[in-house]
Image (cartoon, grey):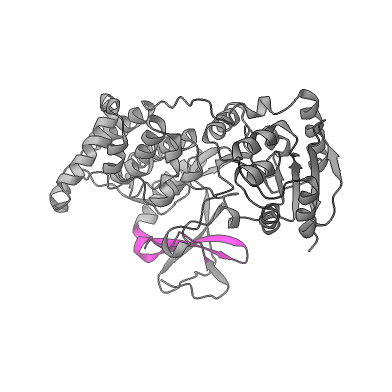
Amino acid sequence: MSVENSHDRMVAGSFRDPAGFVFVRQGQLYRQVNRVYQEEFRTLIDSGLQAALSDDGLMIRHESVGEPPADPANAYCVIRPDPVPFVSYPYEWSFSQLRDAALLTLAVQKRALAHGLALKDASAYNVQFVRGRPVHIDTLSFARYREGEPWIAYRQFCEHFLAPLAACGLVDPRLGRTSIAQLDGIPLDLASALMPARSWLKPGLAMHLHLHARFQRGFSGAPAAAGRTRVSRTGMLALIDSLERAIASIRWRPSATAWSGYDADEAGGEYRARKLAAVQGCIAGRSLSLVYDLGANLGRFSRVAASGQGVVVAADADAVVVDANYRACREEGIRDLLPLVVDLANPGPGIGWNNEERIPFLRRARPDLVMALALVHHLAIGNNLPLARIAQMFRALCAELVIEFVPPSDFQAMRLLAARRGAVHEYSQAAFEGAFGAHYGAARAQVLSASGRALYHYRRSG
């Protein structure tokens, strides 16, 4: 497969499927459907499944277009999918986000069976969050259902969804980042070994995780024998129901973390009021397509930037606060805010084939504006990063920056300094202004608190 037009760019991560690929031409996103998938694509359209899933918000919409294909030798047609405002990956999702993505995948599989099709793959990367809810994005992941055939994507679903959910819910939420190293999900034998003994008492996990792992080992040398298993349509629906119950049985009750109460304890009400007014002054009346709020905690200031016109990515390293933020957005009907688990000191890298299938977080998009409120002291003191390096990172990320400086005399900075117990790089307001001024120029500070916390609004020309 080759993209013949030098002006076309194949989207990273879409090259593996022989059925087709996604490409960009003159800033517009397209998907080429290859001839090898022609029959099943026509079945998807003619059955009404694609329209039904799109109408109900379960799958991304697409329309057929007369655009020339990027690879004419293999092409059947070209379609234009609705763009996803910001692409995120499963290792950046909180527990509740991954659970909702899993339930969406099962709902799509159940709908597909009713239309005579089935998902041929159940990758978590086939799901994205759009306007506050998960949606299926892979139009080419359906195949004709044949009575008696088992669900070919069952193992993949368990590795991409059930195993990570069990690992996060029953062991430690930090295991959600395991999929950075395990691109195809957590292997079932590994997940089974990680589980506490009490997981055997949950019938769904005993069947779909522990016994499934044993079954895999038993048939590892005889795939043909495993493939002779027959499953009726009724049995397939029962499997989906069983997986839904297994997911519902995993209850994550997060304990408090160092930063889960930080938003409430951060400082007094007067400080928060000044900070809110200062941030609103930087954003009011603006039309912003993409905003990053880095170190967002529970998203108090992310909501200030959320205007309904674009997307605010509310990133934080603490999976507990990200999950709380996501659940609150869901309950409040906030649809333009995307909470993600991102450790800015160690963000998601480029992974997969040639390090290109999954794009690094810091290279994935170009935000119109970045907010970094009460964050720099964590990076400079907590992670021992020089201010010059921090400013350099922000310069590469954005041209407009709303950033807060917390002085070393502030209580929160003093906590970090006490915990460091060693030499730290120079950390002062003068050093901060010098580091960021070298990249952005001068900016007037708005004092927010008696301790000297200050807000800077930097704009870089060119």
Highlighted range, magenta: 10-39
On the rendered structure, is 366 left or right of 347? Answer: right
Q: What is the tally of numbered marks visible in this picture?
A: 0
Nearest to the observer: residue 402 or residue 386: 386
* Quarter where residue 18 is shown: bottom left
Residue 431 position in % (x across, y down): 77, 51
Residue 413: which quarter of the image?
A: top right
412 falls in the magenta region: no
Residue at the outermost right position? 444
Q: In the rendering, at what x and y percent does residue 145 appear?
A: 28, 47
* Residue 197 to residue 387: above or below: above
In magenta segment, residue 12:
yes
- At x 42%, y 40%, the residue is 175
Of 387 and 176, the residue lying toward us: 387
Q: Where's the N terminus, which quadrant?
A: bottom left
Residue occupying image coordinates x 56% and y 35%: 322
Which residue is located at x 44 percent, y 73 percent?
2
Res. 142 in view? yes
Which residue is located at x 56 percent, y 29 percent? 324
- Position of residue 423 measured from the top left corner of the image (x, y, whole percent): 64, 47
Q: Residue furthest front?
A: 422
Q: Quadrant of the C terminus?
A: bottom right
Give whichever of 284, 462 is nearer the camera. Answer: 462
Q: Is residue 285 visible?
A: no
